[in-house]
Amino acid sequence: MKRIMYITLVFLLAACSSVPQSEFEQNLAIWQNADISHYKYDLWIGCFCIFSDEMPLTIEVQDGEVVSITKATGSLVDETDPSHEFFIKYATLDRLFASLEEDTASGAEQVTVSYDPIYGFPVEAYIDHSQQIADDELSLQVSNFEVLE
């Protein structure tokens, strides 16, 4: 009888105790559970880059695909744009999450992120791959998020 009670207690405790999720995982789940298929946002990318006068980018996404990327100057970013490959890495909020996860997994020395309290997506991120190297830092800011119909 004691053994049955012990086994039952072990199962109950195991069911009640779960591995706590990281802040990243919690916010990724919030974003995924929001199930937003069509949205736009402004993205400011701060780095030691030549395109700082083109910020912020306005990005529209539908069904996980980039509909458009527009520079602050009003010009569209297409595949011929020299910065396209760099911009496309952050051109959906899912890609932004993936990039931050990759930065953390690759051993960036500092990854600091704050999240939207409603939808969970990153609103500010600071990444420094090596504090011993100057000019490798990257800042990302998401603003003016809007769900589109």
Image (tube, rainbow, N blue to C red):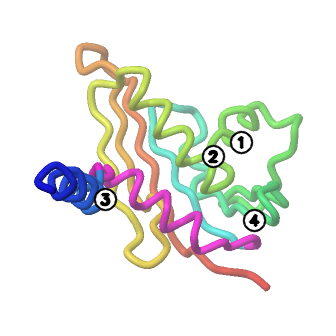
Q: Residue 108, which numbered label?
A: none
Mark 1 = which residue?
88
Q: Residue at x 42, y 26 (%)?
A: 105
Helix, strand or loop status at disc 3: helix
- What amino acid does circle 3 point to? Ala
Helix, strand or loop status at disc 1: helix
The x, y position of residue 26, in whole percent, is 39, 59
Q: Of the residues under marks 4 and 2, which one precedes in the sequence? A: 4
Nearest to the eye among marks 3 and 4: give it: 3
- What amino acid does circle 2 point to? Arg
Mark 4 = which residue?
60
Farthest left residue in view: 2
Q: CA distance from mark 3 to mark 4?
A: 42 Å
Q: Considering the image in quadrants, where does the C terminus appear?
A: bottom right
Q: What is the magenta segment's predominant secondary structure?
A: helix
The x, y position of residue 80, in whole percent, is 88, 34
Helix, strand or loop status at disc 4: strand
Q: Is residue 113 left or right of residue 37?
A: left
Q: Is residue 30 magenta?
A: yes
